[in-house]
Image (cartoon, coloured by chain):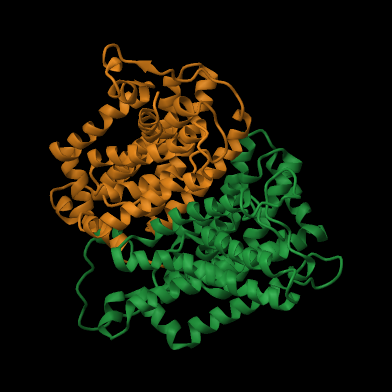
Chain colours: A green, B orange
């Protein structure tokens, strides 16, 4: 609970008999509709963003028309799916720890480390081992790397009480500098020109495509499996149940004999592994190498995805597609309206602020 | 100038923006609200100060505008958290995104533009003292301002009724309420005031330190400031030394490079963040007890709703 609850006047003492259920007002009935917050956010945010854009001298209506038009071309729609795949994994990386009451703001760093570990394995093995083996090794390396990077924050939290929101944030910058340090020097592609980068992986070490000519890779399958697996793990397993208890009331969990520390670490490790997978999928499915700026803020947007989805796995998938579409529309913004692509952060932020401030979703999740 | 003097002087100059932000965060957290979006307030402050300086020609007008811009962004955080009861950490992060987006939307026109920035002013006599002179007394006016703001903040928090009210809002809001004050109002003012200071910090960055505007120019300084507040145990004066330490870590990389010392630049770039983490590790357990009561609730178990 937020500490503002302290400020509320004390709730009246429980009455002996249960109060008769009051007839719900229209507002209350509207608030009970779970998707309404989404609708308000999705409808209200463009108005605010449009106002800002109008101040900038760009006609918001043409801008939105351009944005929508750009998304309907098959190539763009495909890119939205490809990015949504990474965002699903990045979103789940936030959602799992959030169930245990942990705030993983380090998705970006974990994605970077996942990509670095996967690339490291790929660079060593891709010319020696069969493609399938290389890909499996890269997947493992990405997941383990991401998990360890997140585990660092979990360890700090449990041993020296450093809040994980702060430590994961700081670790993002360390991870990024680590990657840059590698590709500017030891892993630098000697034959590359312009921007420093690592050597592109050979074709066999790239994620297979669904159809020739399409850019859609099997990362989509990985994301779908991840969504179902996380949904199942949180909903159907003892572990998922315990995570929710810890997230709801750690003291109660402790008194019930649960090993809270272990549960917290496990949630963070799973989250980190998912982010690491996101890094691997993006590196081996789209980029094929490490380069500066390759993460495209996936980790940070993944954080927004999870909060937009109320940390629920199936909704994470939907939210990932929505934010991927907004992010892609940002590119059209640059081309058609001459506004910087990063401007769409305003749109995303306003959507999130409305959702966070609406309280509609939160009541449902705690129920 | 030798290496130590250069790094120390660079630490003060480069640490000033972090110091302003850390002081702002201190006042917000003392009132019981953590504002993770302080980086966003720095960014909006940096851009607004730069833009206003560009159009008015006066960096002082720019700084005032930058402070107001930082305060306005903090107000968004305050409204969503205090009025709507949203999660503080998540909201702060989203507010940062808002600041990032707004500054890239409105900042593109100012990339590469020249302004009449603050000039370093050597304090007569004092700047002639060996080592101390160049390190402390040959800076831009905003750095001198920070010399005044930090002790003033300490005095405000610990020696005035206003400070008692702010700390009361963070520790025992119910007591404050019993004395007829509104803890919510105090928190609003503390968060907005914190955003104002962060905006001034951002202004120092763009109009006195780099003398340029570019997208996401704060590069994590706001997060360092948030960590610094914990490191300093929510004490304004301890924040000073911390800010300069991290400023020095930032200044080390260019100073070494200028001397042709061949270290991987990115190892050095990671230094401020690693130093911050290490400081939290070393001091974490001890500092956690110093947290305002209202804040420990946020920190102890991050609510995931």
Percent of width and height locating residue B294 = 24, 57
The N terminus of chain B - image quarter = top left
Q: Is residue A123 visible?
A: yes
Give the vertical position of A65 relative to B116 (above or below): below
Q: Nearer the viewer, residue B222 or B270?
A: B270
Instruction: Identify the residue shown where x is 30% and y is 20%.
Output: B133
With A323 as the anchor, is A92 left or right in this view? Answer: left
Question: For residue A20, what is the image quadrant?
Answer: bottom left
Percent of width and height locating residue A199 = 71, 57
Q: Is residue A87 visible?
A: no
Q: Nearer the viewer, residue A43 or A118?
A: A118
Q: Nearer the viewer, residue B166 or A278?
A: A278
Instruction: Identify the residue shown where x is 52% and y is 46%.
Output: B266
Question: For residue B171, what is the image quadrant?
Answer: bottom left
The C terminus of chain B - image quarter = bottom left
Q: Which residue reaches farthest top?
A: B124
Percent of width and height locating residue A294 = 65, 54
Percent of width and height locating residue A267 = 44, 74
Instruction: Identify the residue shown where x is 66% and y is 75%.
Output: A222
Image label count: 0
Q: Nearer the viewer, residue B276 or A268?
A: B276
With A6 as the anchor, is B246 left or right in this view? Answer: right
Give the vertical position of A41 relative to A343 (above or below): below
């Amino acid at each position: 609970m937020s500490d503002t609850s302290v400020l509320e006047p004390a709730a009246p003492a429980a009455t002996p008999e249960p109060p008769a259920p009051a007839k719900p007002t229209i507002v209350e009935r509207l608030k009970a509709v779970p998707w309404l917050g989404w609708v308000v956010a999705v409808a209200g945010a463009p108005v605010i963003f449009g106002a800002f854009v109008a101040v900038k001298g760009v006609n918001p209506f043409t801008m939105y028309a351009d944005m929508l038009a750009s998304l309907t071309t098959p190539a763009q729609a495909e890119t939205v799916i490809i990015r949504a795949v990474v965002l699903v994994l990045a979103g789940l990386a936030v959602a799992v720890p959030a169930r245990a009451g942990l705030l993983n703001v380090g998705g970006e760093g974990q994605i970077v480390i996942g990509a670095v570990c996967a690339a490291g394995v790929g660079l060593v093995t891709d010319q020696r081992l069969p493609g399938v083996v290389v890909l499996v090794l890269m997947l493992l390396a990405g997941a383990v790397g991401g998990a360890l990077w997140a585990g660092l924050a979990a360890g700090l939290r449990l041993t020296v009480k450093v809040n994980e929101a702060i430590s994961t944030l700081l670790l993002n910058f360390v991870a990024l500098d680590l990657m840059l340090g590698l590709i500017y020097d030891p892993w630098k592609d000697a034959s590359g020109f312009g921007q420093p980068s690592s050597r592109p992986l050979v074709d066999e070490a790239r994620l297979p495509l669904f159809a020739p000519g399409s850019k859609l890779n099997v990362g989509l399958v990985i994301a779908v499996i991840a969504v179902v697996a996380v949904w199942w793990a949180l909903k159907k397993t003892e572990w998922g149940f315990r995570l929710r208890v810890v997230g709801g009331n750690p003291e109660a969990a402790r008194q019930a004999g649960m090993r809270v520390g272990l549960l917290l670490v496990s949630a963070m490790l799973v989250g980190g592994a998912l982010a690491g997978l996101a890094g691997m999928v993006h590196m081996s499915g789209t980029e094929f190498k490490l380069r500066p700026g390759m993460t495209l803020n996936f980790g940070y947007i993944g954080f927004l995805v999870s909060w937009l989805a109320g940390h629920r796995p199936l909704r994470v998938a939907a939210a990932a597609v929505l934010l991927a579409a907004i992010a892609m529309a940002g590119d059209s913004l640059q081309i058609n309206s001459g506004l910087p692509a990063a401007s769409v952060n305003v749109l995303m932020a306003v959507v999130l602020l409305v959702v966070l401030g609406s309280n509609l979703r939160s009541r449902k999740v705690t129920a | 100038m030798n290496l130590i003097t250069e790094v120390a002087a660079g630490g003060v100059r480069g640490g000033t923006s972090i110091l302003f932000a850390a002081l702002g965060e201190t006042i917000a957290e003392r009132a019981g609200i953590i504002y993770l979006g302080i980086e966003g307030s720095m960014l909006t402050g940096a851009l607004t100060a730069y833009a206003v300086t560009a159009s008015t020609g006066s960096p002082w007008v720019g700084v005032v505008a930058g402070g107001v811009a930082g305060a306005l962004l903090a107000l968004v955080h305050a409204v969503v958290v205090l009025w709507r009861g949203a999660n503080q950490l998540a909201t702060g992060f989203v507010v940062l995104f808002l600041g990032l987006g707004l500054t890239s939307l409105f900042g593109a026109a100012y990339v590469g533009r020249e302004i009449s920035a603050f000039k370093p002013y050597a304090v007569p006599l004092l700047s002639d003292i060996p080592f101390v002179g160049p390190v402390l007394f040959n800076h831009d006016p905003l750095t001198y301002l920070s010399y005044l703001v930090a002790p003033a903040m300490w005095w405000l928090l610990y020696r005035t009724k206003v400070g008692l009210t702010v700390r009361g809002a963070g520790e025992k809001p119910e007591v404050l309420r019993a004395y007829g004050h509104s803890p919510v109002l105090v928190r609003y003012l503390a968060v907005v005031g914190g955003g104002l200071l962060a905006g001034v910090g951002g202004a120092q960055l763009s109009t006195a330190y780099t003398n340029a505007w570019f997208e996401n120019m704060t590069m994590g300084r706001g997060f360092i400031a948030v960590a610094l507040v914990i490191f300093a145990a929510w004490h304004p004066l301890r924040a000073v030394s911390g800010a300069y330490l991290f400023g020095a870590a930032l200044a080390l990389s260019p100073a070494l490079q200028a001397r042709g010392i061949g270290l991987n630049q990115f190892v050095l770039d990671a230094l401020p963040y690693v130093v911050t983490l290490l400081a939290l590790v070393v001091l974490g357990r001890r500092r956690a007890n110093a947290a305002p009561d209202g804040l420990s609730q946020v920190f102890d178990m991050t609510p995931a709703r």
